[in-house]
Image (cartoon, coloured by chain):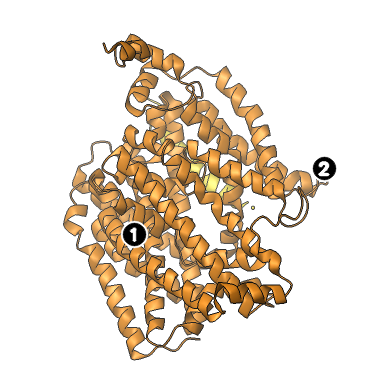
Chain colours: A yellow, B orange
Amino acid sequence: VLGMSIAYFFSFLGLLLAYSCRKK
Amino acid sequence: MVVFRFLDWLWLVIFIALMIVCGTLFYRLGKRSMSDFFLAGRGLPWWLPASSVYATHSATDTPMWVSGVIYQYGLRGIWYTFFSAWCAISAFASTRIFRRSLAYTQAEWQTLRFSGLGAELLRGWIAGWQVFMNMFVLGWVGIAMGKVCQFLFGWPEWLGLILFSSLCAVYVLTAGYWGVVMADFQQGVIAFSVIIIVSIWGIVAAGGPQGIMNKLESLGQSWRLNPFAFSGVTSGEFPLAWFLTMLVIALIGGFGMGTSIDWYPEAQRIQSAKTVRDASYSIWAGSALIVVRNSLWAVAILAFFSLYPNIQSTAEYEMAWYRLGFEFLPVGLVGFFFAAIVAIHLSTISTHLNLGASYATRDLYHHYFKPKASEKELVWVGRISTLILLIGSFFYGLMMQEITQWLIFAIWIMTAGIWLPSILQVIWWRFNSWGYLSSWIANLGLSWLIVWILPEFHVIPQLPDYLRFWIMMILGFLIYIPVTFLTPTEDMDRLVKYYVMSRPIGWWKPVREEAERRGLLRSNYEQREGK
């Protein structure tokens, strides 16, 4: 119920992509 | 194994052609803009998104799941399906607030409610999670269809998964959400009609309601007719504590956004309705249909139990409702029944293909990669995202069945830790983006601790689900509330703009007073005096 961490990994990728905004 | 006659094949081919043509016909509307491709231009009357809510939440694995809990627990098993009652509350609370915000997606809503870097990080976080979750749900529902086809025709599992998901992708790729919602309406009508026919047919085959009750009594199984047959306050397989926890999660959850995994497809339907009132009616009516459907299924499964009372294997009794249809319907209607199963399946697949693509296109590509992209380009990105989700779902369905099993359990735990913060973000002005983000991250750590690490090292015993929910909620609260108060409040300009636009309920007094001071809202005194 490791499975949750896999889903969180994708969330973290989205968060990294957002972090596009740091210069702004 | 089921043998199809000419009439059965005829039903099936006509229905599949009708579904695909019906969806594809809306190609011209779907390609006009991103708003059309993902929200049907926000112009739908309430009954269209309502039928879509109902059709989306009827998947091929749904009758298997309902059959499982009713066969195992009797009529009290129907409470497992009562989680959808959050929609009845939400229809008049969070649904109205969300529709007024005009956010395309729940991820976008985070940047309307919150401000600064924290809001952006939350948007990326939820968009990444939703792209993955939709791909996963597609694999999970797709492999369920593969299993149904294997049960019926002896096909290998991959054939049912790939064939029907690909057929569905035809109209989702061409017409986007216009195709999804129009096909959903037609599929919803077919599915609901067949659910009524098969369930009543099964009940009659078992001797009608009186016959079922007499049979259960003779088997010494009358307790199965009592939906409140609790096994104790905290003991046994159906404790009162679980029931009360479920009621709290379902009913209070309606005041939040994201308190249930179902919120995300519902949010798309809410935004596609043409007015706030249409959005409310659509969510309420769609979930009312779901509750009626579950009740019909429950009685039909009791009928099945009275006919076949001694099945031990879960995999076998989960097929109860399907068996009622295929064993008792006359020749000719069997093809009609399978066409309805295909309708039930396609309506769920189409929604998750389009929903996952909306997060990839609107939140990840348009917002972070290319804010100046043209509408035409965004529609094409939507189509490419749909295709990637489709291929990804084959991968999940076929290659990672074990992970699929993990995640089904994980979904429940995942929403446990963020249930309360998902409500707080709607009803409390002071709750900020860092508080909400910390609740998500704390949820992962707490889940590892409560679900695996502490029980594994015998620090605490293995706990029942409902107790895990309360413990994780309290421990999470002790983390995200201090984080909220140790970090700054959201920018007041943003809060006022959000308040005036969305009119949230709950504790928003400082923001409301500021909006009145700026002349953006009339005060209660002015309203009374008619100024």
Chain name for mark 1: B
Q: Is residue B175 among the parts visible in the rendering? A: yes
Residue type, label 1: Leu
Compute the Cα span from label 1 to label 2: 47 Å
Category of crowding for the residue at label 1, using alpha-carbon neighbours closer than 10 angstroms: few (below 14), some (14–19), many (at least 20): some
> B153 or B55, which is in the foreground?
B55
- Residue B459's disc is 2
Image point (42%, 73%), residue name:
B197
Q: Are marks 1 and 2 in contact (CB under 8 Å)?
A: no
Query: Earlier along the polypeptide chain: callout 1 or callout 2?
Result: 1
Q: Residue furthest right?
A: B458
Q: Where is residue B438 in the image (x, y as percent from the top left)?
A: 57, 31
> B128 or B524, which is in the foreground?
B524
Category of crowding for the residue at label 2, using alpha-carbon neighbours closer than 10 angstroms: few (below 14), some (14–19), many (at least 20): few
Image point (49%, 22%), residue name:
B507
Image point (56%, 72%), residue name:
B209
Q: Which residue was labeled with disc 1?
A: B387
Q: Position of residue B97 (x, y in %)?
A: 38, 33
Q: In this view, does B129 lie to the left or right of B245?
A: left
> B55 or A15, which is in the foreground?
B55
Q: What element carries label 2?
A: loop
> Which quadrant holds residue B119?
top left
Residue type, label 2: Val
Q: In this view, does B398 lie above or below B54?
A: below
Q: Is residue B333 above or below residue B406?
A: below
Q: Is residue B155 among the parts visible in the rendering? A: no
Q: Position of residue B458 (x, y in %)?
A: 83, 46
Q: Is residue B225 left or right of residue B24?
A: right
Q: In which quarter of the image is the C terminus of chain B?
A: top left
Q: What element carries label 1?
A: helix
Determine if marks 1 and 2 fall on one subunit.
yes
